[in-house]
Image (cartoon, helix red, strand yellow):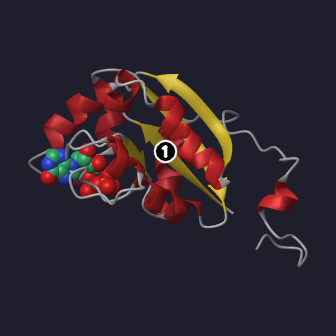
Amino acid sequence: METTLIIVKPDAVQRGLVGRIVCRFEEKGLQLVGMKFMQIPMATAERHYAPHKEKPFYPGLVSFMTASPVVVMALRGVGAIGICRNLMGATFGSKAAAGTIRGDFGVSNAFNLIHGSDSPEAAAKELGLFFRQGEIVDWTRMGEGWIYDLSSGTPE
Ligand code: IDP
Ligand code: MG
């Protein structure tokens, strides 16, 4: 099982799209194991986007992400990182395929509604930035055996 960090970005919160975006992940079958509403402190945004520090869009990105509240989520599942990236769609709203979150809800390249970790290393780092000990909750879903085939002992 992988756990990934998703951020419903300020543009999505301002546009009243939180419920519809959360719904995409829930209905796919990913398990919600952490969630909070927050305004991202500047230092956290800078650390989160540190890999982009040298890019021309970095200053604008950090000010966008700290300008207004976000919803951060921890989502779990087999291959959750890749599944979430597919549900999100390509980085630019203008290019993202229809059927994806970015493809369906946005046209902007910078204001692209959602962040998702892109590797297990990034997920571990980002979850640590946004969730303290105890804020990610391990729990058992009643319907797990109908979301995955558990007959072999491992979720398929
Ligand atoms: P990702 O969010 O799909 O992983 P990244 O390349 O990691 O895309 O970029 C991080 C974020 O920076 C994007 O989600 C987007 O908000 C912003 N961004 C990326 N490239 C550009 C650009 O060329 N212009 C403006 N903003 C950009
Ligand atoms: Mg990225």
Whether disc 1's CB lies below 8 Å from ligand 1 is answered no
Q: Quadrant of the C terminus?
A: bottom right
- Where is residue 138 drawn, in percent x and y? 77, 44
Closer-to-camera residue (58/128): 58
- Where is residue 18 drawn, in percent x and y? 48, 30
**Disc 1: which residue:** 6
Instruction: Give above or below for 13 relative to 28.
Output: above
Q: Is residue 96 left or right of residue 23?
A: left
Q: Is residue 21 left or right of residue 133?
A: left
- Quarter of the image for residue 73 reads top right
Closer-to-camera residue (16/32): 16
Q: In which quarter of the image is the N terminus?
A: bottom right
What SS does tag 1 mark? strand
Res 110 seen here: yes
Which residue is painted at 42% across and 60% down in the image? 118
- Quarter of the image for residue 77 reads bottom right
Which residue is painted at 41% across and 54% down in the image? 100
Query: For the residue marked with disc 1, what is the amino acid?
Result: Ile
Which residue is painted at 47% across and 56% down in the image? 87
- Where is residue 48 drawn, in percent x and y? 36, 43
